[in-house]
Amino acid sequence: MARVITHEAAADPADVLVTEAVREHAGALADAELPAYIHDLDALSRHAAGISSALPPRVELYYAAKANPAAEVLRTLAPHIHGIEVASGGELAHVRRALPDLPIAFGGPGKTDDELAAATDVHRLHVESEHELRRAAALARAHGRTVDVLLRANPPVDVPGGPAAVPLAMGGRPSPFGMDPGALDLCAQILADEPALRLRGIHAHLASGLGATALGSLAEHLLDWAAKWAARNRVDLHELDIGGGMAVDYGHPATHFDWPAYGRALAATAAHPDAPVLRIEPGRALTAYHGWYVTDVLDLKHSRGQAFAVVRGGTHHLRTPAARGHSQPLAVLPRHRWPHPWPRPAVRGEPVTFVGQLCTPKDVLASRLVLPGTLRIGDRVAFAMAGAYAWNISHRDFLMHPPPTFHYLPPRENHLDQAGSAT
Ligand SMILES: *Cc1c(COP(=O)(O)O)cnc(C)c1O
């Protein structure tokens, strides 16, 4: 179900899709440095500041590290967020090294004893099952610690439009994530007699890919349900973590999740007199927009009437389009050098499919795009929206091509400082 993106989707793709700093940096790289992942930390910082300022005071913003755990990204987000959500012992150790002072929430299914033992001092432990709760309690006791927990719920709350309407449904249907109400009740009973664990509230991350209106109404329903659950079990609901999943539309790169509208919806929910602290933990919507995978066109060919551009690298570096079945938005950065005595192959005004160097028909980055200009061998191509679930979800060793290089463009003040022209 790869979508066809024509140039109508973005009037001037190069301008919409690539920041000035990234364009400049991409142009200055040597061929041998391609493919390159380039992150614009200045733009990321401004994006995160905008999200943070759209949220009401009683809402805490955590970042789901699995979207992009690069230390440079984490440190750029740090001033704008309350904490980090991690989902493995590996992420836990990595985030502690990168940001020793930021609160950490540790969630995810299938935690091992070693992971639970390493997590006895996290800010919040998100518990996924009764068995996990009992093991966490035993390990907390063994370490002489009291662990603050949220119980992860799979509540009887409908995902707006139904689970089939979102790209990644994790609740609202049979799911390995979270617990049914009966299991939650049992956990509440266990916790009543367990001094090594302190129940702080409920966690529920139901789906990824929802718009602001849908997520806003989901928050209200979740609070309603969680407050009733807590009352029925005679426990205090201090906190409600309503997860991430804010939509990112790869077909419309300039259209972002409506954070101000979501912030207003959460403010209304948080205004309820007994409302707990609300917490959200977006991943994709925070970091997708500020990473680019830049490469160059190695070959252009026609096969039975269709044009193919073969780029250096491929889905072993940028698996996102293969994983989601979309065309990764891209902009062409033309190059003028052509060192060969024969004519330079080019395509113009016809659909082009961008593929990588892997020997598999699944190595497609974008299908049948009609570009606004000419594409030539040797041109550079910047695949946009590659800042989340991109490099870190990719099968990087398949075919043993060299890895990409990584570039983190610092916040603008630093550019000026280095140039000695700061005012
Ligand atoms: C993956 C995940 C997130 C982040 O989801 P996004 O769609 O990237 O916002 C948040 N919470 C949990 C529990 C997750 O598994």
Image (cartoon, grey):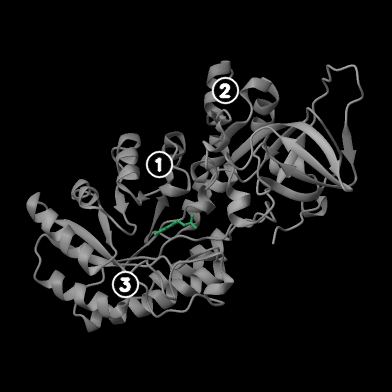
Along the line of sight, the residue nearer the viewer: 174 or 191 = 174
What separation in Å lies between label 2 and label 3 (alpha carbons)? 52 Å
Along the line of sight, the residue nearer the viewer: 5 or 192 = 5
Say which residue label 2 marks. 416
Q: Quadrant of residue 371?
A: top right
**For marks 1 and 2 on the same chain, the one whose residue lies earlier in the sequence:** 1
Q: In the image, ligand 1 is in what quadrant?
A: bottom left
- Secondary element type, mark 1: helix
Of the 4 image quadrants, the one containing the C terminus is top right
Q: Quadrant of residue 251?
A: bottom right
Residue 199 visible? The answer is no
Image side of residue 102 versus residue 222, left or right = left
Q: Residue at x 66, y 34 (%)?
A: 294
Tell whether circle 2 marks a residue whose Cβ is less than 8 angstroms from ligand 1: no
Between circles 1 and 3, the one closer to the viewer is: 3
**Callout 2, which amino acid?**
Leu
Q: Name the spot of residue 80 as percent of width and height, x first.
A: 43, 45
Q: Residue at x 69, y 37 (%)?
A: 382
Q: Quadrant of residue 248?
A: bottom right
What separation in Å lies between label 1 and label 2 (alpha carbons)? 22 Å
Q: In the rendering, which numbered label is found on residue 78?
A: 1
Tell whether circle 1 marks a residue whose Cβ is less than 8 angstroms from ligand 1: no
Say which residue label 3 marks. 179
**Callout 3, which amino acid?**
Met
